[in-house]
Image: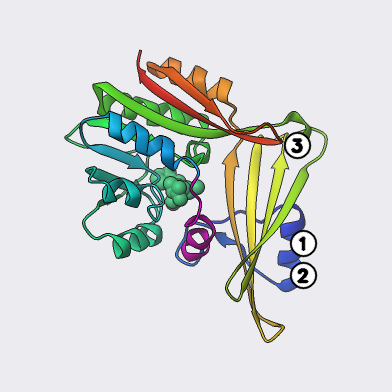
């Protein structure tokens, strides 16, 4: 079930009579894919780690293969796991040789172990604390003794997450005849960020279709994540950060403690 969209997205839903749909669900998958397919963030880091590791790669929350497809194209053996059938279908349509597994990243089991496990695009924040603890346990179980776990997230400035009121940020992008309005809603009290995407299809200056998609993530800073990883038996051996700003992406490279 999709939660009601908060803030401005909720008002737009009421105004246009829209029912929010999950961003990674059957209808949202093409929208997420359109938004992400030209995003090159994290790719060079993931390709470098893949080059340095000898052995199969497991990509968790692989989606439509933004990172998976370039890995496979360079000859790496990669297994793509995601719980969205629709996104995995898009991945399959682009490279049918890639092994895809439809599963929850906090509930998977393989008979093999991996030289590199990748969990990019801040997807770790889709899980709550208990699910993350289970996931990190599974990573430890499936990572080779000299293996590497790559995980990324986002440090959010305290000014965006006051406990007294919600804050919002809005951006717009165009994909062909569709205008996408991205509404980010930060709820410091609940410790979550909801991303809503309003799509408006325009034909001859007239809007002919509107849909609304949402996805909620936990606010999880790099310090908290590092502590959770340590509890699971994973040590951060490299850390990178993006440019200073309200939302600073971070990448952690971990090994068995
Ligand atoms: C931000 S997207 C990242 C997708 C891809 N890594 C990329 O860079 O485009 C998050 C992905 O996590 C998947 N996802 C959400 N919850 C999940 C879960 N519990 N288990 C596995 N995948 C999940 C979604 O279907 C979606 O593909």
At horizontal 50% and vertical 43% (from top left) the residue drawn is 41
**Residue annotated with mark 3:** 160
Please determine whether, in this image, residue 162 is positioned above or below residue 7: above
Please determine whether, in this image, residue 83 is positioned above or below residue 150: below
- Does mark 2's beta carbon lie closer than 8 Å to ligand 1? no
Q: Are marks 1 and 2 in contact (CB under 8 Å)?
A: yes
Q: Secondary structure at mark 3?
A: helix
Mark 2 surroundings: few (<14), some (14-19) or many (≥20) residues within 10 A: few
- Does mark 1's beta carbon lie closer than 8 Å to ligand 1? no
Mark 3 surroundings: few (<14), some (14-19) or many (≥20) residues within 10 A: some
At horizontal 74% and vertical 48% (from top left) the residue drawn is 169
Q: Secondary structure at mark 2?
A: helix
Q: Nearer the viewer, mark 3 or mark 1?
A: 3
Of all residues shown, which one is farthest toward the left? 111
Q: Specify the label residue 15 is tagged with.
A: 2
Percent coordinates x, y for residue 108 in the rendering: 30, 39
Please determine whether, in this image, residue 235 is positioned above or below residue 185: above
Mark 1 surroundings: few (<14), some (14-19) or many (≥20) residues within 10 A: few
User: Does residue 131 appear to the left or right of 158 in the view shown?
Assistant: left
**Residue annotated with mark 1:** 11
Q: Nearer the viewer, residue 154 or 213?
A: 154
Percent coordinates x, y for residue 208 in the rendering: 65, 82
Q: Quadrant of residue 106?
A: top left
Mark 1 → mark 2, Cα distance in angstroms: 6 Å
User: Does residue 217 appear to the left or right of 147 in the view shown?
Assistant: right
Disc on the earlier residue, 2 or 3: 2
Write the start and end of the magenta stretch as one range: 29-40
């Amino acid at each position: 079930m999709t939660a009601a969209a908060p803030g401005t997205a909720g008002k737009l839903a009421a105004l246009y009579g829209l029912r929010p749909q999950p961003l990674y669900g059957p209808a949202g998958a093409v929208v997420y894919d359109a938004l992400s397919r030209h995003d090159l963030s994290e790719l060079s880091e993931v390709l470098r780690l893949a080059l340095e590791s000898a052995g199969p790669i497991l990509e968790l929350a692989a989606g439509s293969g933004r990172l998976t497809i370039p890995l496979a194209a360079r000859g790496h053996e990669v297994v793509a796991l995601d719980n969205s059938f629709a996104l995995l279908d898009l991945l399959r349509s682009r490279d049918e040789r890639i092994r895809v597994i439809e599963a929850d990243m906090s509930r998977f089991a393989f008979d093999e172990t991996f030289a590199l496990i990748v969990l990019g695009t801040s997807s770790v924040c889709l899980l709550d604390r208990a699910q993350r603890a289970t996931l990190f346990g599974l990573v430890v179980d499936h990572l080779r003794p000299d293996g590497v776990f790559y995980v990324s997230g986002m440090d959010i400035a305290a000014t965006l997450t006051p406990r007294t009121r919600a804050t919002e940020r809005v951006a717009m992008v165009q994909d062909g005849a569709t205008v996408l309005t991205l509404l980010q809603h930060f709820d410091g009290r609940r410790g979550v960020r909801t991303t809503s995407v309003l799509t408006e299809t325009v034909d001859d200056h007239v809007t002919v279709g509107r849909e609304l998609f949402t996805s909620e993530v936990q606010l999880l800073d790099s310090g908290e994540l590092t502590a959770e990883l340590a509890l699971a038996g994973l040590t951060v051996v490299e850390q990178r950060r993006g440019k200073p700003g309200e939302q600073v992406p971070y990448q952690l490279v971990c090994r068995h403690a």
